Structure formats: structure tokens, C-alpha cells
Amino acid sequence: MRDAATSENESGQDNARALDNACRVAVCNEQERVARALHDSVINRLFEIGLSLQGTLMLLVDQPSRDRVEHAIEDLDATIREIRSTVFALEAGSMGTQRSVGPAASRT
């Protein structure tokens, strides 16, 4: 009787470990999906907006307006860097490794 109880206990522990591993895989997959979605849509859109503002910057003649647009472009660059850092952290977390973040591409 003791062998059957021990075997059942070990089987329950194996099932718990398998369930825990399945949950970890699901979380990793979701993190990777979110990271790809952020990178593919949000970062690209922000980059497009920055390029549009750069084009507008060339049309502006008064310095206060130019300064405002330049500041907006800098803010967009900072936002892109923050999102990329988050994306890389999600990817690194799902792979169980650290990944360094390179510099963001400059638009100027």
C-alpha cells in the first residue's frame, strides 16, 4: 500500500511540474507575441511620425516653431528607445537570457 501511495504522490508531483512548465511556456509565448506586435506596429508608426515631423521641420522658418518640432522628434526617439528596451526585456525574459539594447537608429 505504501508503494502505491508513493507512486501516486510522485505522479502528482510530475503532473504539477508539467503544468508549471506549460504555464511558463504559455507566458513566454505571450511575451514574444506582445514584443513582436509592439515592434512591428508601434515603433514603426512612431518612426513614420518622426520622419514626417523632420520633413515639416524643413518648411518652418521661425525658430520657436523649429525648436518645438525638434523637441517632439527627440521625444519620439526617446519613446522608441523605451519601447525597444521593453521589447528586448520581454524577449530576454522569454528566452531566459540577458540581451543588450543597442542604440536606436538616429533620424537626423
Image (cartoon, grey):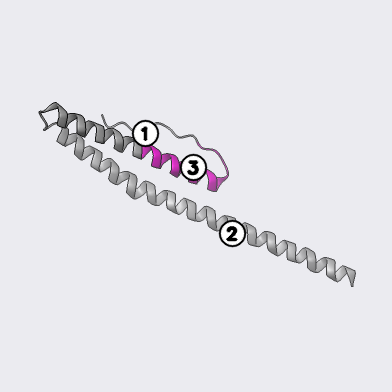
| Few, some or many residues within 10 Å of mark 1 (<14, 14–19, 20+) | few
Q: Provide the secondary structure element on which disc 3 rests.
A: helix
Q: Which residues are magenta?
A: 80-99
Q: Residue at x 20, y 33 (%)?
A: 68
Q: Magenta stretch containing residue 78, yes or no?
A: no
| Few, some or many residues within 10 Å of mark 3 (<14, 14–19, 20+) | many
Is the residue 40 above or below the residue 100 in the image? below
Q: Provide the secondary structure element on which disc 2 rests.
A: helix
Left/right of residue 54 with respect to residue 44 in the rendered view: left
Q: CA distance from mark 3 to mark 2?
A: 19 Å
- First in sequence: mark 2 vs mark 1: 2
- First in sequence: mark 1 vs mark 3: 3
Q: Magenta stretch containing residue 95, yes or no?
A: yes
Tell me residue 49's x, y (percent).
24, 42
Residue 86, image quadrant: top left
Left/right of residue 92 with respect to residue 3 in the rendered view: left
Q: Residue at x 60, y 60 (%)?
A: 22
Task: Provide the residue designation for mark 2.
Answer: 23
Task: Provide the residue designation for mark 1.
Answer: 104
Q: CA distance from mark 2 to mark 1?
A: 33 Å
Q: Label 3 sits on what residue type?
A: Ala
Task: Provide the residue designation for mark 3.
Answer: 89
Instruction: Quadrant for the N terminus, please.
Output: bottom right
Q: Label 2 sits on what residue type?
A: Cys
Q: Residue at x 10, y 28 (%)?
A: 61
| Few, some or many residues within 10 Å of mark 2 (<14, 14–19, 20+) | few
